[in-house]
Amino acid sequence: MNNMKTVTLIKGDGIGPEIADAVMRIIEASGLELNWDIQSAGADSIKEDGTPLPPRVLESIKVNKVALKAPITTPIGMGFRSANVQLRKALDLYANVRPCKNLPNIKTKFDDVDLVVIRENTEDLYAGLEHKIDENTAESIKIITRKASERIARFAFEYAVEHKRKEVCCVTKANICKLSDGLFLDCFREVAQEFPKIKTKELLVDNLCMQLVQNPQVFDVLVMPNLYGDIVSDLTAGLIGGLGVAQGANIGKYGAVFEPVHGSAPDIKGKNKANPMALLLSAIDMLRYIDEGKYADKIEKALYKTLEEEAFTEDLGGKLKTTEFRDAVIMNMNE
Ligand code: NAI
């Protein structure tokens, strides 16, 4: 019987196919055989299927329950909603998890950063409820519900327990958005009572940003509504070396999509310059999610060894091409 696990793979746009191929080759070299269900989405699908997110992609993820996704370009002004936002909504991937931890030899302003941004992924200003009131006035509606706020708070506390973290900090702008962010904060306080062993903190998002650029080491798990999470997680990516190294996951009750924080980087497309590390780190988390931790550990060890040898791509000040970095990781796995 074929026991190979099946994972949906979206190679995406821009640098997506280059980094996806590098990551597939590294996983293959670890000795793990996966059955990749490769699905196109994004710009190519607009040409072929008339939409950046054809129903077959959603069907594939619903069946396989797990996907690895390279970035997709969101065309501006073509009338398409972001495929990324649609995907998260259609599969109810309500928790966006973005770990942020210093990596070996990547020089940054701070050492010992080890925090996780947990972003609510389904509502807030991303509900897409925008309209023009008149020629000079536009309105965008921020939706915050008890259901979504409670479940993201519970997810954050359960994540803290599972990953042996000590504190969860709720980030809002409840002093200004008194009803919407106020509800998010109330739900956090209620759910916190179910987890008496985890410490809690509450911060306004502007204060958090100031503290993150001065003293990021003090933070542990941060939970926040969608828009603040989008912005804060790019800031925290900057703390550990930039977008090329920042991994992410979108997790729901029925499945998960693992993807880097960065976009399709059209400026370096096809130049063999992209850093595949953010997608590789996302893939390592994906392997742990599908209970292939042994292979995740093996790849992570080889990646860390590669970084200890200061074998970097250009975005980190090195000279390696995407394929050379891939080969360096593979070589370190085989030693
Ligand atoms: P971007 O993240 O693609 O690029 C920003 C800068 O970082 C560029 O200079 C790029 O060259 C560099 N960069 C990004 N990833 C890199 C990597 N792995 N290695 C080396 N350098 C890297 O952001 P941008 O330009 O704002 O967005 C481009 C497209 O990507 C847009 O259409 C946007 O909508 C889409 N996007 C898609 C995401 C997704 O699929 N999850 C997430 C963010 C943006």
Image (spheres, helix red, strand yellow):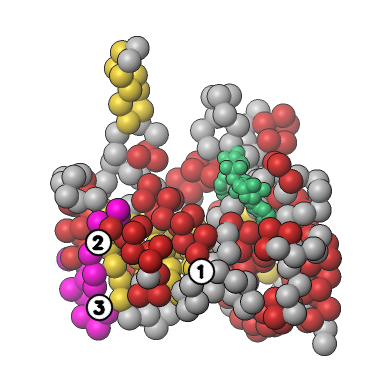
| C-alpha separation, residue under disc 2 versus residue under disc 3 | 14 Å
Compared to residue 245, the image places residue 124 above or below, namely above
The residue mark sitting in front, 2 or 3, is 2
Quadrant including the N terminus: bottom right
- Please tell me how crowded label 3 is: few (under 14), some (14-19), or many (20+) other residues with Cα within 10 Å: few
Answer with mark 1 or mark 2, whichever residue precedes in sequence. 1
- At x 75%, y 79%, the residue is 309
**Residue picked out by circle 3:** 199
Which quadrant would residue 260 be assigned to in this image? Answer: bottom right
Quadrant including the C terminus: bottom right
Give 211 or 62, whichever is nearer the viewer. Answer: 211
Answer with mark 1 or mark 3, whichever residue precedes in sequence. 1
Look at the numbered disc 3 and give the secondary structure of its residue. strand
Look at the numbered disc 2 and give the secondary structure of its residue. strand
Q: Is residue 183 left or right of residue 41?
A: left
- At x 33%, y 44%, the residue is 124
| C-alpha separation, residue under disc 1 versus residue under disc 3 | 27 Å
Look at the numbered disc 1 and give the secondary structure of its residue. loop
Give 211 or 224, whichever is nearer the viewer. Answer: 211
- At x 17%, y 58%, the residue is 186
**Residue picked out by circle 2:** 203
- Please tell me how crowded label 1 is: few (under 14), some (14-19), or many (20+) other residues with Cα within 10 Å: few
Residue 266 has which mark? none
The residue mark sitting in front, 1 or 2, is 1
Disc 3 residue type (three-letter): Lys
Residue sticking out furthest to the top? 135
- Please tell me how crowded label 2 is: few (under 14), some (14-19), or many (20+) other residues with Cα within 10 Å: some
Residue 262 highlighted magenta (yes or no): no
Find the magenta span and give its range. 190-206
Q: Does mark 1 have its CB less than 8 Å from ligand 1?
A: no
Which quadrant would residue 40 be assigned to in this image? Answer: top right
**Residue picked out by circle 1:** 109
